[in-house]
Amino acid sequence: SQTIHQWPATLVQPVGSPLSLECTVEGTSNPNLYWYRQAAGRGLQLLFYSVGIGQISSEVPQNLSASRPQDRQFILSSKKLLLSDSGFYLCAWSVLTGGNSPLHFGNGTRLTVT
Amino acid sequence: AQTVTQSQPEMSVQEAETVTLSCTYDTSESDYYLFWYKQPPSRQMILVIRQEAYKQQNATENRFSVNFQKAAKSFSLKISDSQLGDAAMYFCAYRNLNTGKLIFGQGTTLQVKP
């Protein structure tokens, strides 16, 4: 069966520090991969999605970047965190083909920038 | 660009009663998929139900059913025989078939009263 791992679960970082959140998927090949951010009590905002290695689409201009160095690995990064980067970050995957296949989410990372 | 709107930030229902959560969306596409996700306090995203736009028949999953009105671009979720465990935030989502992106609404927080 497929599983998705996302870490760390919680992170507190000072303003101006770098960020690296990692997400890996097991049990499937060529997945679509996604990074979402959820502000407190709000909906999910799509940040990045990837349909293959090295293929990253950015949805909103921001202080963040994403990379997909391997088929089942998706990394969210920042060189210098801002206070506004605080939030709950969710990684997700879906099968590459088949629009009705749902997104499967990781457990999320709660990021607090101080 | 596609958008998803959930006009009810909060809803409440008495245990064992029925509640309907509203969702509307905007798209120029003729084929797409719609989803409802549940996010309990653990913040894990759980798929509740899905609907293919080309199907006229409304999807049903046990106590959960949808009212899909394609012309009106409406996709409401009905929860029958509400249980305390149904208390959560519910998100409506639209999936673009070409990109695979899943666009979420702002969510509706459902409270179930004993």
Image (tube, coloured by chain):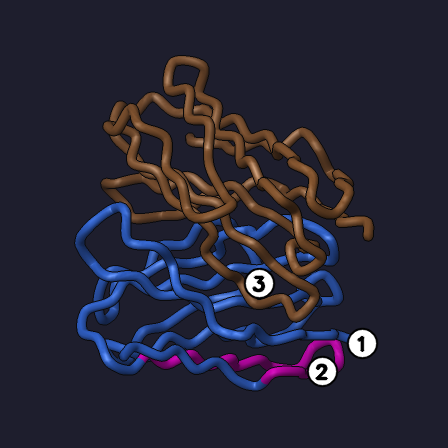
Chain colours: A blue, B brown
Amino acid carrying label 1: it is: Thr
Q: Which residue is mark 3?
A: A63
Q: Quadrant of residue B53?
A: top left
Residue beneath the point at 75% across and 66% down: A83
Name the residue nearer the viewer: B113 or B39: B113
Give the alpha-carbon distance from disc 3 to disc 2, as whole Å: 15 Å
Using the image, name the chain to which the residue with label 2 belongs: A
Which mark identifies residue A32?
none
Q: B110 left or right of B72?
A: right
Residues behind callouts 1 and 2 on a single chain = yes
Q: Is residue A95 above or below residue B13?
A: below
Give the alpha-carbon distance from disc 1 to disc 2, as whole Å: 6 Å
Instruction: Tell me which segment is drawn in magenta.
Output: A9-25
- Disc 1: CA contacts within 10 A as few (<14), some (14-19) or many (>=20): few
Residue B80 horizontal/vertical position (percent): 58, 40
Name the residue nearer the viewer: B13 or A98: B13
Amino acid carrying label 2: it is: Gln
Q: Is residue B7 above or below residue B81?
A: above
Which mark identifies residue A114?
1
Residue A48 horizontal/vertical position (percent): 42, 58
Callout 2 secondary element: strand
Residue beneath the point at 61% across and 34% down: B21
Residue beneath the point at 31% across and 27% down: B57
Q: Are marks 1 and 2 in contact (CB under 8 Å)?
A: yes
Looking at the image, the residue that sits furthest to the top is B71
Which mark identifies residue A13?
2
